Amino acid sequence: MTEDVYNPLDKLNLARSIEFELLTREPGPLSSVDHIPGAGVYVIYYSGSLPIYAPIAEGNKGGTFSRPIYVGKAIPKGGRKGGLRKDPSPTGNALASRLRQHAASIDEAINLNLADFSLRHLVVDDIWIPLGENMLIETFQPTWNRAIDGFGNKDPGRRRANQYKSPWDVLHPGRRFADKLGDGGMTTEFLEQRVADYLAGRPLARLPKVIADQQDEETKETEESADEA
């Protein structure tokens, strides 16, 4: 029988090492992130009582924290412009800044409680951050990454007149910048069913075309620009 040769530098093995290291970290409250240095990857957990997220909260009950609701990354300023830093120590506050934005989004939502959210984070050398994020999303398939888009959105600013509320903002209204965005034809009931179908492994109903097109455009912009604070 031929046995595969293990290559520790294989891309998949490198990605798994980032995931393993992050999952050894102790979870902490999303409400307290100012002390976090540097840039890297993170997973956010929900343990509240909203019925639509009951399967997720069940996976995080009793401090087990096994089912993230969202996975993200924070790239240092200039992180997509190339170049290698000689000093590997964490610098900047990309992680803390990004997580503060997430905490503010949840705090503004009328049907979410910031106290119900925890996170694990890992400060990662710049070039491995996207690889680690991709691995974590692939492993956990988080609901806010896969079924309910928009949690990580920032204020679209001057593009606001052409923007629609994201699925996340329809399902969890309250963010001030989203109040001025257009209606893309989604209802709360439609999105709650989308969550239920996703968590049950059923096919998802299609989003309205304007929303799907907007998500494609946002993905393209994210890939072309740094995910900076």
Image (cartoon, rainbow, N blue to C red):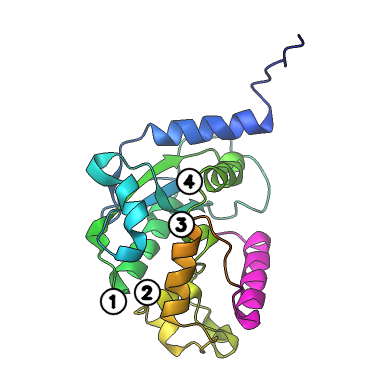
Q: Of circles 4 and 2, which is in front?
A: 2
Region of the chain picked out in magenta, as a range: 206-229
Query: Which residue is label 3 attached to?
Result: 199
Measured as percent of width and height from the top left, residue 226 is found at 60, 59
* Point 31% across, 74% down: residue: 108
Q: Quick check: 113 left or right of 127?
A: left
Q: Are marks 2 and 1 in contact (CB under 8 Å)?
A: yes
Q: Is residue 170 above or below residue 199?
A: below
* Point 38% across, 62% down: residue: 102
Q: Quick check: 200 left or right of 58?
A: right
Q: Of circles 1 and 3, which is in front?
A: 3
Measured as percent of width and height from the top left, residue 229 is found at 47, 62
Measured as percent of width and height from the top left, residue 21 is found at 45, 31
Find numbered disc 4 in the image and state the secondary structure of the residue it sits on. strand
Q: Residues within 10 Å of mark 1 (few under 14, many from 20)?
A: few
The numbered dot on residue 172 is: 2
Q: CA distance from mark 2 to mark 3?
A: 18 Å
Q: Are marks 1 and 3 in contact (CB under 8 Å)?
A: no
The numbered dot on residue 110 is: 1
Q: Of circles 1 and 4, which is in front?
A: 1
Find numbered disc 2 in the image and state the secondary structure of the residue it sits on. loop
Find numbered disc 3 in the image and state the secondary structure of the residue it sits on. helix
Res 152 seen here:
no
Query: Which residue is label 4 attached to?
Result: 41
Q: Of circles 2 and 3, which is in front?
A: 3
